[in-house]
């Protein structure tokens, strides 16, 4: 089962400014798109579907929607 990875406007704006955008998007699809609850991610608070992880040196905050198999990235913080 594969999840679609989508980017909310603030995360999409950050993504557009990052170097190697396609490489990062591919890494997201191969990690969180396959297993959004794995890859060293942790739940934020008590909601298991609100999560954060670090993918290719980028801090990622996202929501998982199991009913529509979507990972929505809401925030990206690239390493300096």
Image (tube, helix red, strand yellow):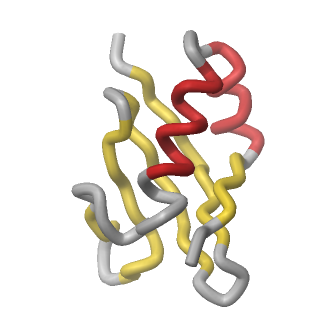
Q: Residue at x 31, y 82 (%)?
A: 46
The quadrant where residue 58 appears: top left
The vertical placement of 50 against 12, above or below, is below
Q: Which of 40 and 13 is in front in this view?
A: 40
Q: Residue at x 65, y 14 (%)?
A: 17
Q: Which of 70 and 59 is in front in this view?
A: 70
The vertical placement of 52 against 78, above or below, is below
Residue projecting furthest to the right: 9
Q: Which residue is drawn at 68% across and 62% down?
A: 4
Q: Which residue is drawn at 54% across and 60% down?
A: 33
Location of residue 24 in the rendering, given as x and y in whole percent from the top left corner? 53, 30
Location of residue 11 in the rendering, given as x and y in whole percent from the top left corner? 64, 38
**Image quadrant for the C terminus?**
top left
The quadrant where residue 77 appears: top left
Is 21 placed left or right of 62 in the picture? right
Is 69 placed left or right of 43 in the picture? right
The vertical placement of 51 against 78, above or below, is below
Residue projecting furthest to the left: 40
Q: Which of 76 and 6 is in front in this view?
A: 6
């Amino acid at each position: 089962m594969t999840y679609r990875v989508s980017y909310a406007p603030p995360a999409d704006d950050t993504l557009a400014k990052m170097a190697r955008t396609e490489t990062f998007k591919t890494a997201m699809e191969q990690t969180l798109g396959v297993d959004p609850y794995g890859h060293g991610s942790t739940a934020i608070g008590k909601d298991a579907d609100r999560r954060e992880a670090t993918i290719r040196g980028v801090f990622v905050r996202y929501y998982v929607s199991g009913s529509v198999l979507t990972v929505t990235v809401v925030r990206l913080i690239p390493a300096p």
